[in-house]
Amino acid sequence: MLVLLTQYGLSPAAVLMATTRVATEAIGMQDCTGTLTPGQWADLILVQGNPLDDIRVLQHAEHITCVIRAGQVVEGTALL
């Protein structure tokens, strides 16, 4: 889906914003999630590669090196 959006003209940055910040605004949850802001909920993934250069790195599980859910590493190792 993310790749398809870039094929129809959205930049990778716009796709990532649409699936995070814009999506939470659409459902009225922007005060608690959607951006990396102190006090908000956040789940993160660390990937090999830069999705802003190639959004396809998000398509393959082998590119995901770490999963952080609610501030806790649940898979992989964080580079902290």
Image (tube, rainbow, N blue to C red):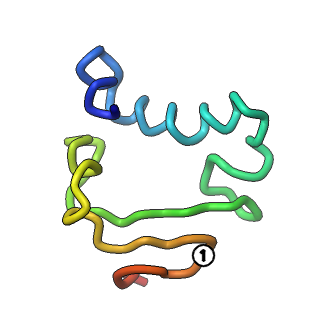
Q: Which residue sits furthest top?
A: 8
Q: Residue at x 20, y 42 (%)?
A: 54
Where residue 64 sits, quadrant-wise, is: bottom left
Quarter of the image containing the C terminus? bottom left
Measured as percent of width and height from the top left, residue 57 is found at 22, 51
> Picture coordinates of residue 62 (x, y %)?
19, 65
Q: Position of residue 52 (x, y in %)?
A: 29, 42
Residue 40 located left or right of residue 64: right
* Amino acid carrying mark 1 in the image: Gly
Q: Image quadrant for the N terminus? A: top left
The answer to which quarter of the image holds residue 4 is top left
Element assignment for label 1: loop
**Quick one: label 1, few (<14), some, or many (20+) residues within 10 Å?**
few
Residue at image coords 23%, 20%: 7
Rendered position, 71 above or below 52: below
- How many numbered circles does the render carry? 1
Q: Is residue 71 above or below residue 17?
A: below
The residue drawn where x is 22% and y is 62% is 63
Against 33, is 55 above or below? above
> Which residue is found at the position 55% from the left and 42% from the top?
20
Q: Which residue is mark 1?
A: 71
Q: Is residue 14 left or right of residue 42?
A: left
Locate residue 74, reporting x and y percent: 48, 80
**Front position in the image: 77 or 60:** 60
Q: Against 62, is 36 above or below?
A: above
